[in-house]
Image (tube, rainbow, N blue to C red):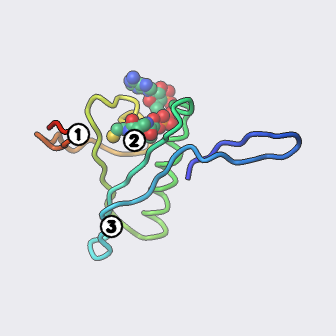
Amino acid sequence: MNSTKFLVGDRVYLRTIGTGGFLRIDYMWRTADLSIMIGEKEEWAKGYGTEAVRLLLNYDFKSLNFHRISLGVFNFSKRAICAYEKAGFKKEGALRDGYFCDSRK
Ligand SMILES: CC(C)(COP(=O)(O)OP(=O)(O)OC[C@H]1O[C@@H](n2cnc3c(N)ncnc32)[C@H](O)[C@@H]1OP(=O)(O)O)[C@@H](O)C(=O)NCCC(=O)NCCS
């Protein structure tokens, strides 16, 4: 989904640097969870994440007419939280024991 441009000779190529989309879509209640991941570390903190989240939200709210988009984020992921808040997300709460990661709670 996210891509950067690079030149080889006089040709411009697009390189995929991450993915994004929606999970747990409920068409009846018009809600979904947003998911995004930039896999190429050297492309972090260049504004791509915020831009991609804004584009996804715009598509979801305007084209699909959804009214609520949620996401979960680890509280130590400061860069992610910053990007999500810049794109318009508001913190609603903190889950206790909400994630199971690397065989640990
Ligand atoms: C999370 C992710 C989508 C964010 O996208 P991004 O392109 O890196 O983020 P952006 O550049 O749009 O915005 C990051 C913001 O955080 C800020 N930031 C970076 N490191 C920070 C830190 N340690 N503390 C606070 N803010 C920080 C940046 O300055 C930037 O804000 P600014 O534009 O106002 O300067 C991307 O980094 C990613 O996919 N990372 C790997 C997966 C991950 O960490 N997921 C989160 C866990 S749920």
Q: Give coordinates of residue 47: x percent, y percent.
A: 54, 36
Mark 3 to mark 1 CA distance (whole Å): 23 Å
Residue mark closest to the camera, 2 vs 3: 3
**What's the residue at 69%, 48% (across, down)?**
14
Alpha carbon distance from label 1 to label 2 = 21 Å
Q: Tell me the tag on residue 84.
A: 2
Q: Amino acid at mark 2?
A: Tyr
Closer to us: 19 or 29: 19
Q: Number of labelled discs?
A: 3
The answer to whether residue 76 of the structure is visible from this angle is yes
- Looking at the image, which residue is at 22% across and 44% down? 92
Camera-near label (3 vs 1) is 1
In which quadrant is the C terminus drawn? top left
The answer to whether one can see residue 86 in this image is: no
Q: Dividing the image into four equal quarters, which quarter contains ligand 1?
A: top left
What distance separates the C-alpha of mark 2 from that of mark 3? 19 Å
Mark 1 vs 2, N-terminal side? 2
Amino acid at circle 1: Cys
- Say which element carries label 2: helix
Instruction: Determine which residue is flagged by label 3.
Output: 25
The three-letter code of the residue at mark 3 reads: Ile
- Residue at x-position 49% and y-position 41%: 38
Q: Which residue, given by chain and number where applicable, does mark 1 sit on?
A: 101
Residue 24 in the image: state x and y as whole percent.
30, 63
Mark 3: secondary structure: strand
Label located before the other in sequence (2 or 3): 3
Q: Is mark 2 within 8 Å of ligand 1?
A: yes
Q: Nearer the viewer, mark 1 or mark 2?
A: 1
Q: Can you give x and y, in whole percent of width and height, for residue 66 in the image?
A: 37, 67
Q: Earlier in the sequence, mark 3 or mark 1?
A: 3
Image position of 3 (left or right of 89) = right
71 up-or-down from 22: above or below: above
